[in-house]
Amino acid sequence: MTGQTTQTAALIERYRALLETDGTPLPLPVTGSSMLPFLSPGRDSVLLARPNRRLRRGDMALYRREGGGYVLHRIVACQRDGGFAMAGDAQQLVERGIRRDQIVAVVCAAVRKGRCQGPGCFWWEFFARVWPRVLPLHGGLCRAYGVLSRFRRGQK
């Protein structure tokens, strides 16, 4: 385990305990690129909360893999056995069989490009409702987003 991974795991374990006792949403910086284009590493952060309702497709959840690593991905399907299928917004590969007891927290809001976004905001709703339905297109759409982003930066 790398130093950053060890620190992240320790932080998440502290968060897990706080969420169970206090319930106040806790901030977590985004470190990986799997949630692009919605969340960017080094720029954005999320607010984690204890799930207070039944989880559904489109929710972002922080979960612990069987190997011990923590991942923030979106629920792309609820399985008949009560488990979940998860994928990052930038990914087409789906991780199936995530059990409810593996889910540590859900994202209740995000600070994206310096603005707080949550349920009801256009981009939040787009990525929660539309994005999971176009999973096979994620690769091409993410590439197009990257090209447009570079083009816009070059125009400024």
Image: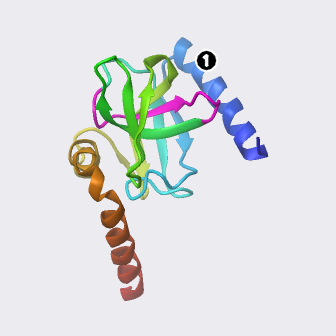
Taking the view exactly as shown, the residue that stands out farthest to the top is 21
Identify residue type, mark 1: Ala
* Left or right placement of residue 50 versus residue 20 in this view: left
Percent of width and height locating residue 138: 32, 57
Q: Is residue 156 above or below residue 146?
A: below
Percent of width and height locating residue 80: 28, 20
- For residue 67, what is the image quadrant? top right
Image quarter (top left, top right, bottom left or bottom right) of the N terminus: top right
Q: How is the image coloured?
A: rainbow
Whether residue 67 appears in magenta in the rendering, the answer is yes
Residue beneath label 1, please?
17
Tell me what residue is drawn at x 52 percent, y 58 percent.
43
Mark 1 Cα-neighbour bin, 10 Å: few <14, some 14–19, many ≥20: few
Element class at badge 1: helix
Range of residues picked out in magenta: 56-69
Front residue (pair 84, 48): 84
Front residue (pair 63, 13): 63
Q: Is residue 126 above or below residue 63?
A: below
Percent of width and height locating residue 58: 29, 37
* Left or right placement of residue 57 versus residue 93 in this view: left
Tell me what residue is drawn at x 24 percent, y 46 percent.
121
Tell me what residue is drawn at x 41 percent, y 79 percent.
150
* Left or right placement of residue 39 versus residue 71 in this view: left
Tell me what residue is drawn at x 23 percent, y 51 percent.
134
Image quarter (top left, top right, bottom left or bottom right) of the C terminus: bottom left
Number of marks in the image? 1
Front residue (pair 81, 131): 81
Percent of width and height locating residue 14: 66, 24
Taking the view exactly as shown, the residue that stands out farthest to the bottom is 155
Whether residue 136 appears in magenta in the rendering, the answer is no
User: Most prominent secondary structure in the magenta stretch?
Assistant: loop
